[in-house]
Image: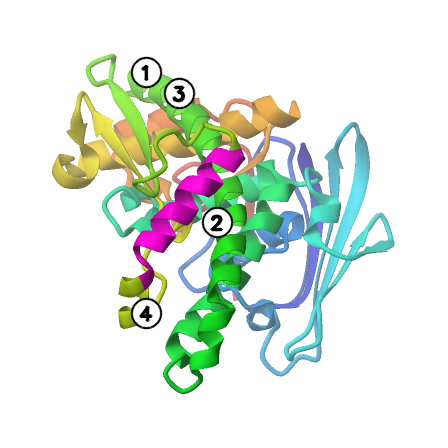
Amino acid sequence: MNLNNISLRNFRSYDELSLEFDAGVNLIVGDNAQGKTNLLEAIAYLGSGKAFRTQKSAELVKLGADFGEIEGEIFSQERNQTLRWILFPAARPKQLYRNGVKKKTAADIAGVLQTVLFCPEDLMVLKTGASNRRRLGDTALCQLRPNYEAALTEYNRILEQKNRILKDRHENPQLLDILPEYNARLCQVGALLISYRARFYEGLGREAAQFHKHFSGGKEDFCLEYKTVSTVTDPFAPVSTINEQLLAHLQSHYRAELESRQSLTGPHKDDFDVTLSGMSVKAFGSQGQTRTAAISLKLAQRELMKKESGEIPVLLLDDVLSELDPGRQDFVLNQITDGQVFITCCEPGRFTKLGKTIEIKK
């Protein structure tokens, strides 16, 4: 899987840009605030329809422009393909084209251009709040399983409506009559999310353990534990069983949710914990251990996607190497001997031997 070229128009800081890429390593160099990360964001958006710095596609359009555009040619699935997005600054829906044919949703381009992004914030993901770890898993799963993305979107929509009922029920008590329907649907979709996540995290932990074993010289045992609603005794159980356990859990929290006027429990609170030889990284891990474990997770994500599709996802390293000591830099670089890689860097002469250098200025 390779991105052969990309063209941008009115995207973020770019008026117009056209670039050809190497099938190996592409080193994107330039000073801060020149647009290096914007270019990586365009690459990631091209294949997924999602930006990693905003949830609003309108913010990707250059200020004052009537529209923005991203277009690229990708070699994947044994042929050359084109993807094109047209974005608008207002409420007008974005447009998507695959090989010149208009498509309805990003699910219609699943697998054409898969990317794995690694940025400095990810280095400390095991120390931050649960929402960042959920985002890591959700981002990967949305690329691996298009049906997961549809379920996640549906779950969030129902959750938002339920929260609105809980907030407005004092002004309109009749809303409580339909609350059981929302809880039932929330549990149905939530059970599906838990089932997907359990299998994903099992594979992610297994692959990450191999990377970490190599990274630490076999000195530490890496283990990932998925944490979901307490009544779900086995996240690998049939979805119908998980559904029943979720519903029982929600019913036990019914009074508490009414009083707090918000949804207190469910898959939207899911998390995972990583331990090294039995010690939680979140609670006890040093900065070096935390970074090493995070690198292992990202490399494991790429490996899972590779095994699933048979193609190597494009790896995006956004200024992450400058945050690592020489030993960890070498480990990461030794793992990217295959597949296409984009690396942003502020120091032009630091990694120039890696591959093609692209300078970004103004």
The amino acid type found where label 4 is placed reads Leu
Kindly state the secondary structure of the residue where label 2 is placed.
Answer: helix
Kindly tell me whether residue 178 is visible in this rendering: yes
Quick check: 222 above or below 76? Answer: above
The amino acid type found where label 3 is placed reads Arg
Determine contact: label 2, label 3, CB under 8 Å: no
Determine crowd level at label 1: few under 14, some 14-19, many 20+ residues with C-alpha closer than 10 A.
some
First in sequence: mark 3 or mark 1? 3
The residue to which callout 4 is attached is 258
Is residue 309 part of the magenta span, yes or no? no
Mark toward the viewer: 2 or 1: 2
Kindly tell me whether residue 134 is visible in this rendering: no
Q: Calculate the distance from the C-alpha at mark 2 to the C-alpha at mark 4.
A: 18 Å
Mark toward the viewer: 1 or 4: 4
Q: Calculate the distance from the C-alpha at mark 2 to the C-alpha at mark 1.
A: 40 Å
> Which disc is residue 232 wearing?
none
Which residues lie in the magenta part?
A: 239-254
Mark toward the viewer: 2 or 3: 2
Quick check: 329 above or below 10? Answer: above
Mark toward the viewer: 3 or 1: 3
Rendered location of residue 47, percent (x, y): 65, 47
Rendered location of residue 307, percent (x, y): 58, 22
Rendered location of residue 174, percent (x, y): 47, 79
> Which disc is residue 187 wearing?
2
First in sequence: mark 2 or mark 3? 2
